[in-house]
Amino acid sequence: MRLRGRKNIRESLERQPDLVVLEPQKLKGRWHEFFGNDNPIHIECGMGKGQFISRMSFNNPNNNYIGMDIYDELLRRGSEKARTLWKSEKGIDEVPNLALVRGNVEFLEKMFEPSELERIYLNFSDPWPKSKHGKRRLTHPRFLLKYKDLLSDIGEIHFKTDSLSLFEFSLNSFSAVELQMRNISLDLHRHGVREDLVMTEYETKFVGQGMPIYRLEAVIGEKVRQEFRRLVAENLEDQTRRGSPRDMDSGE
């Protein structure tokens, strides 16, 4: 029965070539052909049940989104969630700017050309709490260097977790490979749920339990790094001119 169930799931995915990509390596360097446009490509590595990536694709039709996971069952759930959302909100069966990909982050470079991606989302990745498993964490320096190669000159990484130990590890990892961090938060929803941000299934659950969510953004591409440095310099100049120590606080 279990084998039959897996076969049925696989067959359901194979019937959705417009949404589900089971052999992503064949699209390396050609993802814009799949989407039929040149819009930026954002990917969530480890999409879970697909709530986040489905909503992001719906909210931002001028971006292309990829949700990646290694489990067929999660791809199936994600496809149902995305189609239901677009059907209920727009009355259409297609999901025009989303691809759900079966893949492993270990082989990301086999799926994408350098600079083919604009943003990478790492949401509630497995913290791998044992020290001997540190290299498996998706914010380990060996993964960060991989992401750097695949992101464009305005590339960014957005990272969220409920694990303080993983967040501390990640801060050191981002620093070790000299990535500029911004919007660092140790309790993302402490003033109430951030309505401007899309939440994952895990995040909704954890916030409901009163748990803090840790978040940061890392700017990768040179263009966005230059823009960030310019904004920081302007902000510091403005604060110095006003001469108020309280104005030096970032707020988040």
Image (spheres, helix red, strand yellow):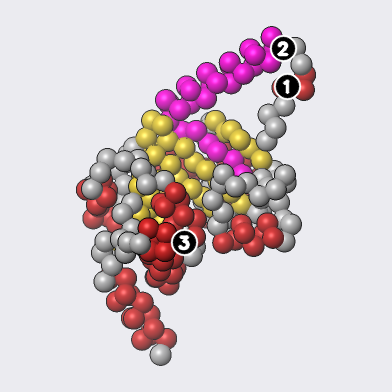
Mark 3 lies on residue: 50
Is residue 216 one of those drawn in magenta? yes
10 Å crowding of disc 2: few (<14), some (14-19), many (20+): few
10 Å crowding of disc 1: few (<14), some (14-19), many (20+): some
Determine the CA span between mark 3 and mark 2.
46 Å
Residue kind at label 1, given as amino acid type: Asp
Residue kind at label 3, given as amino acid type: Gly
Residue 124 on image: x %, y %:
57, 55
- Name the element at disc 1: helix
Depth order, front residue of 99/85 = 85
In percent of the image, x 48 and y 23: which residue is there?
227
Mark 3 or mark 2, earlier in chain:
3
- Which secondary structure dominates the residues rendered in magenta? helix
Name the side, left or right, on which 162 lies relative to 86: right
- Name the element at disc 2: helix
Residue that extends furthest to the right in the rendered view of this protein: 245
Mark 1 or mark 3, earlier in chain:
3
Depth order, front residue of 162/204 = 204
Q: Quadrant of residue 216?
A: top right
Residue 98 on image: x %, y %:
35, 54
Determine the CA span between mark 1 and mark 3.
39 Å
Magenta residue span? 215-242
In percent of the image, x 40 and y 90: which residue is there?
1
Mark 1 lies on residue: 247
In percent of the image, x 66 and y 45: which residue is there?
188
Name the side, left or right, on which 232 lies relative to 96: right
Vertical position of residue 157 compared to residue 211: above or below: above
Mark 2 lies on residue: 242
Does any portion of residue 155 appear in the rendered image?
yes
In percent of the image, x 62 and y 18: which residue is there?
235
Question: Is there CB contact under 8 Å for labels 2 and 1?
Answer: yes
